[in-house]
Image: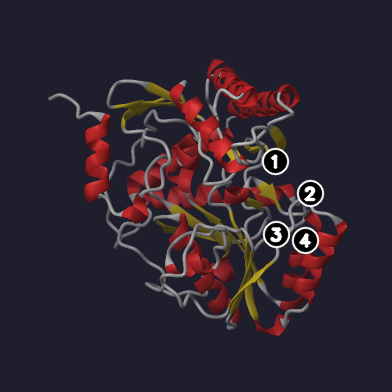
Amino acid sequence: MDSPSIAQVLRDDATYIASYQHIAELPLVVKSAHGSYLVDVAGKEYLDFTSGACTMSLGYDPIPTGDFGSFPFPYATGVAQVAYAKALAQHYPAPVAVKVGFGICGSEANDGAIKLCRAYTRRKKIVSFSGDYHGTTFGAVSLTTIPGRISNKFDPLLPEVYILPFCAQTASKEEIDHCLNSIAALDYSTIAGFIVEPVQGDMGMLPIHPQLMQALYALCQQYGIALVVDEVQMALGRTGKFFSIENYPGVIPDAIVMGKTIGGGIPLSAILGKAEFMDSLGPCEHAFSMAGTSEACARGLQLLHMLEQPKFQAGLQERCTLLLQGLRTLQERHPAVVSQITGLGYAFALWLKSNQALLDDNEATRRVISRCFANGLYLMRLGANWLRIEPQFNIALSDLKRGLEIIDLALSDLESGRLN
């Protein structure tokens, strides 16, 4: 059977797929994938520099399930589920008793975190930060404040949610003082929990300022407030540490929310937290029929075993170094159109600016991404003026260099006016 044309699939997509699932900006129609490459219906290959929006950290080749098999059955104890929970627990950043609750996606895991904070503390208020992205289920979206991403069509959102200003690692003293003063104005006796991204992935790979993170932790310790870190995008090594919160020594959260890559390509989320915190919800109070399937947990367990290998870790560190060096070279070569690099580990944003009178920064970035796409490189920008760069952990070094070369060419075209 002949493959349909790209144009036909895109027409059918517009006809049959709901508009709220139309996230892609590029006309990519994927038929298959392998390694670090996506293959469209015409057979053209695209090097993916986003790891499938961080869902496929080891690329698109299938991860074996070992002896666990593949079946969903939520009403019995699953061997793969228990094995994966036990393995994840070994990575908690403190030697305390912890438990895992599995789910299907990061959004509903953050909904679970809201429930847990309230159940554990018997308080109501949940505090998050401007620019955090926690998901699109009703609880998670109530904490999400990405400009232009979520409308007010389905207000009112969850009550007793408060959004405070965020301070990135590069914040000025005045900005830090403003953040700390906004926290100081809270009534701590009414707060159930802080839910925070240690690295704001969808705002440009912005690590939270250490002073703000330490202040939050100190308040949680003093006033019995739950601290939950959202690691849906960053967990399992994306920032150079197993969890991004480990970049803030001494901060021990009550729970860590995970998703995206942890199922090895199969939908899976997890809340990993202190046992007493996790057990504040009872049976069926945050349960889903397809949560923690055998296949997802088996794949996740194999993924975890691969990540734990010293040889693999050495290779990942080499790639982290090469990527940062490559991005800095791009900034040095193109100062007229590259404004800054943000991020850490293996999660970076390359911020662009226009040097053309007829293009604003966002449109210039869109055209750079389109030129890269035409040359076989897939990137994302999420509607802003930065390139999201999060390659696969095991990408071939030659492919990593090739991707950077394609970006280099596109930036040259922007500088010279060839993208006007």
Q: Name the amino acid type tagged 4.
A: Leu
Relative to residue 358, is residue 286 depicted above or below? Answer: below
Residue that numbered label 1 is attached to: 342
Q: Name the amino acid type tagged 3.
A: Ile
Residue that numbered label 2 is attached to: 170
Q: Secondary structure at mark 1?
A: strand
Q: Residue at x 32, y 27 (%)?
A: 40
Q: Is residue 56 visible in the rendered structure shown here? A: no
Q: Residue at x 55, y 34 (%)?
A: 307
Q: Residues within 10 Å of mark 2 (few under 14, many from 20)?
A: few
User: Distance from label 2 to label 1 (Cα)?
Assistant: 9 Å
Quick one: 174 or 347, which is closer to the camera?
174
Residue 258: percent from the left, percent from the top? 52, 53
Q: Residues within 10 Å of mark 3 (few under 14, many from 20)?
A: some
Q: Residues within 10 Å of mark 4 (few under 14, many from 20)?
A: some
Residue that numbered label 4 is attached to: 212
Q: Residue at x 59, y 48 (%)?
A: 201
Image position of 55 (left or right of 93):
left
Quick one: 391 or 120, which is closer to the camera?
391
Image position of 23 (left or right of 16):
right
Q: Residue at x 64, y 45 (%)?
A: 205
Q: Name the amino acid type tagged 2.
A: Thr
Q: Nearer the viewer, mark 2 or mark 4?
A: 2
Q: Is residue 209 visible in the rendered structure shown here? A: yes
- Residue furthest to the left in view is 1
Residue that numbered label 3 is attached to: 252
User: Distance from label 3 to label 1 (Cα)?
Assistant: 25 Å
Q: Tags 3 and 4 in contact by the CB under 8 Å rule?
A: no
Q: Tags 2 and 1 in contact by the CB under 8 Å rule?
A: yes
Residue 366: percent from the left, percent from the top? 52, 37
